[in-house]
Amino acid sequence: MSRPQRQFEAAVRGGDGLAIIDLHGEMDGFAEEALNAAYAEATSSEPPAVLLNFSDVDYINSTGIALIVGLLAQARKSHRRLLTCGLSEHYQEIFRITRLADFMSIFPDESAALSELQAS
Amino acid sequence: MKQIRHLWQSWRRREDSDARPQASLRSQVVMLDLDIVPNDPLVLYFQTSPGVVDVERLEIDSPVLDSLRAAGVKLVVPLVSQGELIGMINLGPRLSEQDYSTDDRKLLSDLATQAAPAVRVAQLARQQQAEARERERMEQELRVARLIQQTLLPHELPNLPGYEIATYYRPAREVGGDFYDFLYFEDGQVGLIIGDVTDKGVPAALVMATTRTLLRAAAERMTYPSPVLERVNELLYPDIPQRMFVTCLYALLDPASGRLRYANAGHDLPYRRHSSGVDELRATGMPLGLMPGMKYEEKEVILSKGDLVLFHSDGLVEAHNSAGDMFGFPRLQETMGQQPGDDTSSVIEFLLGELASFAGDDWEQEDDVTLVSLRRGVTKEVDKEPQVDERPAVESRNRDLWQRDWQVIAEFELPSEPGNERKAMEEVANRVQDMEISATRMEKLKTAVAEATMNAMEHGNKYRAEIPVHIQVMTVDGALGVRITDRGASQPIPEAELPDLEAKLAGMQSPRGWGLFLIENMVDELNVLTDDVHHTVELIMHLQKEGE
């Protein structure tokens, strides 16, 4: 079984108001474990919102979409907002087509997400 | 009846000049709306005698001529293109009340010579636009009909220990109203439904959806097939559009005893193959929605080990070959008896093989073909994992696309290993980078190629590295095509499920299942072709999209 060219990694930052998960690499089936572990870590302090930072993700496939759907389902169950930033135009469109965009706010970058969160 | 409209006429109305002398100095352009039958003598005269025609001097018995005179027309300049009358310039009397001069006539004649071809081109362009819009509308409707059907057909086969069930469904290009369904009851019995709505397209798909729901609701409340059909008929009759009806067979299997009870609302009779031959499972009843108060005969058989029942729709038996012969019931019955293998998927494969050799390569599928086979196994009854295959089926939307003169610009193979869809994607992108394709569309193509390759590796080749996925990159005038082929044709392909994000978020649908949906939304056309061994997905991207 060949590995993808670039291993997926997810790192958690932030604290009470917002946890940020910086995603790196390719979001496909190989990303599942790291993504779910990062989400569990990010939500351990029960933040009201989690921001997924896609600025260093260059490939998302349908399995990756399914993983995001899984996170979104978890987030909704615990009444937590899930936000995204750093998605390329192409993947923003895919988020619109799949209607993920109806359930999670899409921001161009981290600072835009933060200022919206502070304003609300 | 041929109608020539929008005929321009410059004229002056006498009654106006009498009443309002001021107005008489203004010329008016008025459209005459004439109904002209093609064999009107005036039309023939215009076609054979080009040039300016003096209406008052003409001695022809023609309703059109009468209308022209009544409207005060003095001169007619027919516009004739390639021997066909395509318009007329009609003139009333000159404003100066003098006769038209020789120069006037010459000018008009020259004008007509110039104008006729231009008007013709404009007419053709308008006609083509209208036809293109109509085609677009029909394609859209077919898409909706197919989506409704694919969404409502079962996505999984029943997991019945000791039984094998296989299905095959292939919609015709103009989607018909075929459907099948499986119902599961608490006592372990399983309902099998196969039906066919008359008519095609969206109306058939909607009636199919309604019937399916009514059947499910009735079967929930009533134990036996016959009352279920009676009830559905009563409910359907007042609501079904005129001249539409539904043929439907409902069979209820008790897996433990092998008892199969069935009632039939005018559907093609199923065949049972057993140790001493092949016979029909006959039960009488009128189609659903035709008349109220219908009764349905109910019969039952006991399936012995090794017995097989084939439920089918008329798309198979009514298939015609190029000589105009029909596949027919006797051939179906005979073929079932000849089939050497004895598992359910092989009976379907065998029948499809027979159909292919009967109908020939250029078969134009007229109606949906649906086959459901049920066989009681001879081996020890072991609990099998349910056969879930997420790969959705899409039939070729537009089979003539396969006839396009594609030029293959690249061809390569990749082992079926997880992650290789990225290699496929990069390789295709490399091969087409010199073509005039926008960055946005290139991204879409890449996603579609990756998803289709992943489906091929996972569902077609079961991630067996030694079976490669074959990829062809092709071009044709203004379009780019990618064909992705796996070797998964031997397995029946379940139908596509329309991803429903709400259901997924609520845990009622698997979070997966986005692949085909993405592909469909990324490319301009998606076609699927299956032969005995291979399964090919064709992605087509137009190089320039309108508005880009």
Image (cartoon, coloured by chain):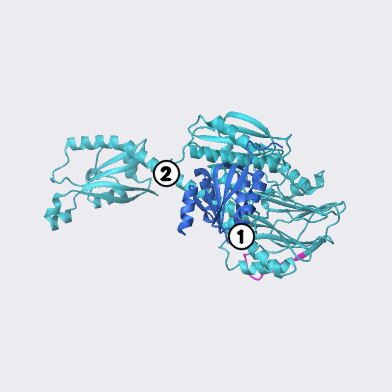
Chain colours: A blue, B cyan
The image's mark for residue A103 is none
- In the rendered structure, which segment of residues is drawn in magenta? B289-298
Relative horizontal placement of residue B494, taking residue A15 as reference (left or right): right
Dot 2: chain letter: B
Q: Which residue is mark 1?
A: B209
Is residue B142 a member of the stretch shown in magenta?
Answer: no
Label 2: which residue?
A: B129
Quarter of the image for the C terminus of chain B: give it.
Answer: top left
The reply to whether residue A37 is in sight is yes
**x, y percent for residue B316:** 69, 48
Residue B519, x across and y down, in percent: 58, 44
Q: Nearer the viewer, mark 2 or mark 1?
A: 1
Q: Is residue A99 visible?
A: no
What amino acid is labelled 1 in the image? Ala
In which quadrant of the rendered view does residue B426 lie?
top right
- In the image, is B285 to the left or to the right of B89? right
Name which of mark 2 and mark 1 comes first in the sequence: 2
The quadrant where residue B450 appears: top right
Given the image, on which type of amino acid does mark 2 rest? Gln
